[in-house]
Image: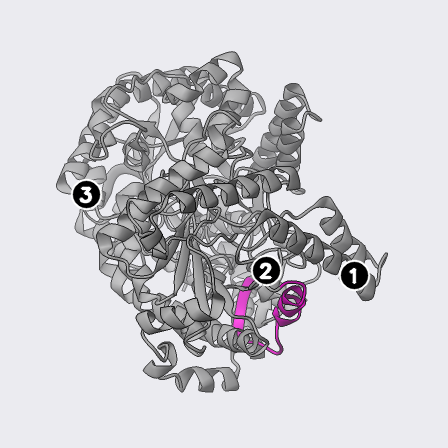
Amino acid sequence: MTAKPAAAAARATVYGYPRQGPNRELKKAIEGYWKGRVDAAALRETAAELRRGTWQQLAEAGVHDVPTGDFSYYDHVLDTSVMVGAVPGRHRAAVDADALDGYFAMARGTQDVAPLEMTKWFDTNYHYLVPELGPDTVFTADSAKQVAECAEALALGHTPRPVLVGPVTYLLLAKPAPGVAADFEPLTLLDRLLPVYAEVLADLRAAGAAWVQLDEPALVQDRTPAELNAAARAYRELGGLADRPKLLVASYFGRLGEALTVLAKAPVDGLALDFTESGAGNLDDLAAAGGLPGKRLVAGVVNGRNIWINDYEKSLATLGTLLGLADRVDVSASCSLLHVPLDADAESDIDPQIARWLAFARQKTEEIVVLARGLAGGTDAIAAELAANRADLASRAGAALTRDPAVRARTAAVTDADGRRSQPYTERSAAQRAHLGLPLLPTTTIGSFPQTTELRTARADLRAGRIDEAGYEERIKDEIREVLSFQEKAGLDVLVHGEPERNDMVQYFAEQLTGYLATQHGWVQSYGTRYVRPPVLAGDISRPEPMTVRWTTYAQSLTARPVKGMLTGPVTMLAWSFVRDDQPLGDTARQVALALRDEVNDLEASGTSVIQVDEPALRETLPLRAAEHAAYLEWATESFRLATGGVRPDTQIHTHMCYAEFGDIVQAIDDLDADVISLEAARSHMQVARELAAHGYPREAGPGVYDIHSPRIPSTEEAATLLRKGLEAIPASRLWVNPDCGLKTRGWPETRASLENLVAAAREIRAELPTEAA
């Protein structure tokens, strides 16, 4: 049957697009600017070229209105803080002296001034800079960036749609500024903020913007009646402005629920909704609310967060249902394409059959355009594309890669006992103390040490054939010896080998497990200039042979102090990959957990007494609605215990988490049953230590005292001050001393100085403790 054409020709659009450029030109220009090799004018020109290239590509693909303002040198939430004048007092002088340098000071800090706190953007692996607000915050409009980029697009002949973080989401993402009472609610500043948004909207209208997109993803979370009333008030006020462009309020990452009715009733001109992660939720809620008569609906039917091709027939069925629920229906991805790589066609090393299953940002744009044509002209208008899509979907469903009977049989045989240690923590703890002989406040690092230019060059030389495998391994051994030597001289108690052989904490393991695919150019922004290449989890997972034992045992042979084995946990292996969407996540997690269990057991058998299984993604993968938390946390914590439950009582299991709101998952942290957990705490001033104490967390913990995401070198006294705060919540007998995260992104000079200060701080605090504390 031929689908009926839409009453109004559907248009294709996107919420946002990757910023980095085909070869990460933005990263290189910004880091060159930080090092003094690129001046501000050259940096701005690189940015302008990337924007021009993106808009041109989108327009040529058939996208009607292109997003502007979503481009950022570092983070779009930080850009919003600049737009509304919410610059922390400690950064005001730097911003006034030089806006660009002040911007980067807020993001990265300086030696004398701490940066803004950083945490995860909802349930993604993107990090944003947390706004700091208080009752004395004064907002002032600065629309220069938004207006300039809108004008750029217009001058090039495009139809721009400026994208702003919405006022409600902005305030809900904010935290009380340092020195402000912890119970201060930034949302109370809404009436003070809305006039600033009104001024920015008026400036954009004057600049020629017909539509402005206001992103409100916070409304897909559980919201109180007061928060929903604030959203209603915000859009009643902004929608009622006489001098404004048309307003498109966008939500993504899930179901809007009660907030959908609030926005549907607001005097705005359109809504953009996610119809992928919400399942049928937004569709059902929209129908129940009576649709959007007289308004534009932008339907996110192409998944903006994963890399599998769209099911055209399924999406067209959804779009067809939506036609009767709005004045016009346009087609988009479910969220900004910031969360996927740029172009799957660049992946020449992937099997051509498998490549047919993949869609990165460029391919997703093409899918959106095809669906818009199909919605506007009927299925006959895209008959060839539909046939090709059916064949590609069938190819994936029938591929041998996706099902390994041995893996599935092993997973099915897992019992509850497999996920439990043989003794409770109190007994294990005594055995570990006797076995390891560590001092009070033991010092360690999270795992990785600086990835130097020499290391990257060695990997490139190996790939290019300029050195052989033996030559490469000698370079790795040299690096491990240097890392171990430094740690011993610095006085660290539990050492690491530094991970010089690893390209990324997920990719390294994915390349050694069956079922995973690695990309060469699949870069995705994590924060600032930090980009990662998430592997593709395409099939059933197993471990053909040991992955880390060789280098860990080599490192242990160089020292009498314990060397930690370093692994990435099952939840993080999923969260930082593009995960398969053809089976439940819990099933995939168990497969990964069993592969890691084999590695943990082999490490223990080789003499490794301390094994760290990192789970930094445990919190970020938490569903945005509380009703879904229990089911997720059940399989997430079970998979960790399955990976670690087979070791002896005197083997100490560590885990690590960073840059998330840990208060939401303290019980889950407890349920992991790890012996030691290290967590980010420096930027949040030991907040997590207080949260663990409030919960009654019974095990050992290392809240970080060195913020590794800033180039600052913390002094001994600064680290000691944080340790004293940690001791207010965690007894000395259970407190570890460590950085916030791995040191891969830092340089050696700052790493040496910072770790030496960290060890000195631990020694200083040990000397202050009463004898009985030991």
Disc 2 on helix, strand or loop?
helix
Residue 499 percent across, percent down from the top left: 62, 57
Whether residue 327 is visible: no
Location of residue 711 by image quarter = top right
548 or 303, which is in the foreground?
548
Tell me the quadrant of the picture where the C terminus can be found.
bottom left
Mark whose residue sits in front, 3 or 2:
2
Rounded to the nearest whole Å, what is the CA distance between mark 2 and mark 1?
A: 22 Å
Mark seen at residue 574: none
Residue type, mark 1 in image: Glu
Residue type, mark 2 in image: Gln
Residue 739 percent across, percent down from the top left: 48, 46
Mark 2 or 1, nearer chain start: 1
Disc 3 on helix, strand or loop?
helix
Q: Is residue 391 left or right of 688 when viewed as pictured?
A: right
Q: Is residue 554 left or right of 570 when viewed as pictured?
A: right
Quick one: which residue is furthest to the top in this view?
97
Considering only vertical position in the picture, is 430 above or below 298?
below
Which residue position is annotated with label 2? 507
Start-end of magenta stretch: 536-559
- At 56% from the left and 67% from the top, the residue drawn is 392
Whether residue 313 is visible: yes
55 or 251, which is in the foreground?
251
Residue 313 percent across, percent down from the top left: 43, 62
